[in-house]
Image (cartoon, rainbow, N blue to C red):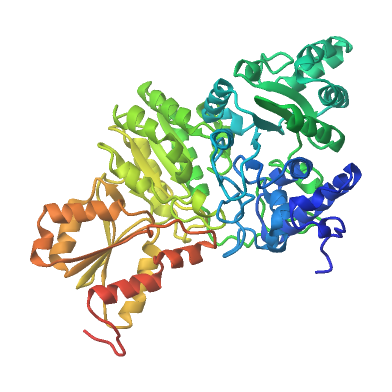
Amino acid sequence: MTDRPNTPLLDTIQRPADMNQMSDAQLTQLAQEVRSETISAVSETGGHLGAGLGVVELTVVLHAVFDTPKDKIIWDVGHQCYPHKILTERRDRIRTLRQKDGLSGFTKRSESPYDPFGAAHSSTSISAALGFAVARDLGGNVPEGLGDAIAVIGDGSMSAGMAYEAMNNAGHLGKRLIVILNDNEMSIAPPVGAMSAYLSRLYAEEPFQELKAAAKGAASLLPEPFREGARRAKDLLKGLAVGGTLFEQLGFSYLGPIDGHDMDQLLPVLRTVKQRATGPILIHVLTKKGKGYAPAEAARDKGHATAKFNVITGEQKKAPSNAPSYTNVFSDYLLKAATEDDKICAITAAMPDGTGLNLFAKRYPSRCFDVGIAEQHGVTFAAALAAGGMKPFCTMYSTFLQRGYDQVVHDVALQRLPVRFAIDRAGLVGADGATHAGAFDIAFLANLPGFVVMAAADEAELAHMVATAAAYDDGPIAFRFPRGEGNGVDLPERSIPLEIGKGRMIKEGSKVALLSFGTRLAEVEKAAEKLAAKGITPTIADARFAKPLDRDLILLLAENHDAMITIEEGAIGGFGSHVSQLLADEGVFDRGFKYRSMVLPDTFIDHANPSDMYAAAGLNADDIETKVLDVLGIAQIGTATA
């Protein structure tokens, strides 16, 4: 395409080894070309833009200095990996990012040997890098070899306890390990940049053991205003002195902070670390999310996640909305409930915008808590809020709630505390793929004693489930809803609590009962329309609850039909398994009753648009129609039959 950027140096790079003969000036130019290519590619595919732009220089330097894929670069979360993919034999496919059969938006072991460890959830990189370092020293063998292990972790990911657990272990083991703290929260004022440049020269020129005293003495030589600037840049956490006290106490040598966009700082420091490091070392790099692309730098989220966009203006090309999103419906009705009940509060784990709690935070800042990337803490915090008489809504994506499961069991369920779990991104989520799929929450919550588990069939049902959760004080309760737009149904003026454990009949028919749990109900109704044209009129019911089950409804359906099919957007072991257990316990199968359960397949489904993903899962209307014909023993129907 003629509007793609001019990238003469990048055009000569197929793999990192091609950078070996480049001068520092050429590497600097290469970084600019990688940035242009990243912007161009994401403008065509959409995706995570800002994080990658913030690490372009760092990515180029890492691949120029280290010997990948023998040396292992572990990108925490992985949403900053687009420049890395461009440099590692995947540029020809970079415009397939997040598309069906295309490149993943995260690092992925099966995609490339340059992705030694997959990611998408945060704070895993230091643990993984330490594992590679220990494997190396124990004589482990992999096709690419085992060299240095480098973890690149953002300051946001450092809010999770797992990062410190890994650092504590690494400091104890004393293995050669490199951690790069990609800190994009602080801006680099000129005096701080000058201080960083001075320290960088010291680090590059002197043996490591002489650096600690030099670093501590350097700040005292500056005028007082500059000293304060140096302290602010140096202190990642409040109360730390120059020298990285916390990291040093954990057993790491600490270098920095350095300007992550200045190749004249990055190159000598990384080269020196490669030559001289013996034990674990942390390099504190200051970067700017969205760097080098004005629309991203100006955006409130620094271009974190974007749809396709116009490169010149930055204007995103979003399809017009036909209905409110489930997340917005949840947010609106939670706000309404909180207006009437001052005991309602909300917790999120670093996802206030994604979960819709940003509006709650503006209206009720004292009752909204963003705990950072700390789901374990968030769940226990919510449990104690409930024990203290509040009504906490613990609002997390299904995939991230997995990170706090022990706390769900031990701190919430075991104590029967009335925490309300609002579970966003239920089911298959599209371009983010398997790492973000909400596949397991039905199964891992419905097996817990005393838990109420609901799934909204549409946005009106979601509104009522918010009210149900707000009114329920007898124990933990959860409701799940998907990403994206609703069905466009009319929303209630006032949401009404549902009767616990009671489903609803949608349409009465005969022979086969379709019992839906969640938003596949729309596909069930489409399948029923197709079946009606063939003379088959299935009964349709919306279970609403996976726990407690509506025993009366399920047993009535079993009594009045020859067969039952359950449909859910979750893995095996969820709603359908509970229904089959009930039917078995009641002896329903003893009389030859036919039963099928449609669930997500026992595999991880790769990224695509949601419709394609559900087609791969066998959960679209055509699949449901086929299942009905199969269970009724009808292979083909050319004309209507009774």
- Above or below, 516 relative to 405: below
Residue extending furthest toward the bottom: 639
- Above or below, 601 relative to 125: below
Q: Residue at x 41, y 68 (%)?
A: 620
Please indicate whether residue 435 sits to the left or right of residue 26 in the image.
Answer: left
* Nearer-the-camera pick, 132 or 152: 132
Q: Residue at x 33, y 42 (%)?
A: 445
Residue 261 position, x and y percent, is 81, 37
Q: Quadrant of the N terminus?
A: bottom right
Residue 142 position, x and y percent, is 56, 47
Residue 237 position, x and y percent, is 66, 20
* Nearer-the-camera pick, 527 or 466: 527
Q: Quadrant of the C terminus?
A: bottom left
Res 279 visible = yes
Q: Residue at x 83, y 65 (%)?
A: 3
Q: Residue at x 64, y 21 (%)?
A: 252
* Nearer-the-camera pick, 417 or 256: 256
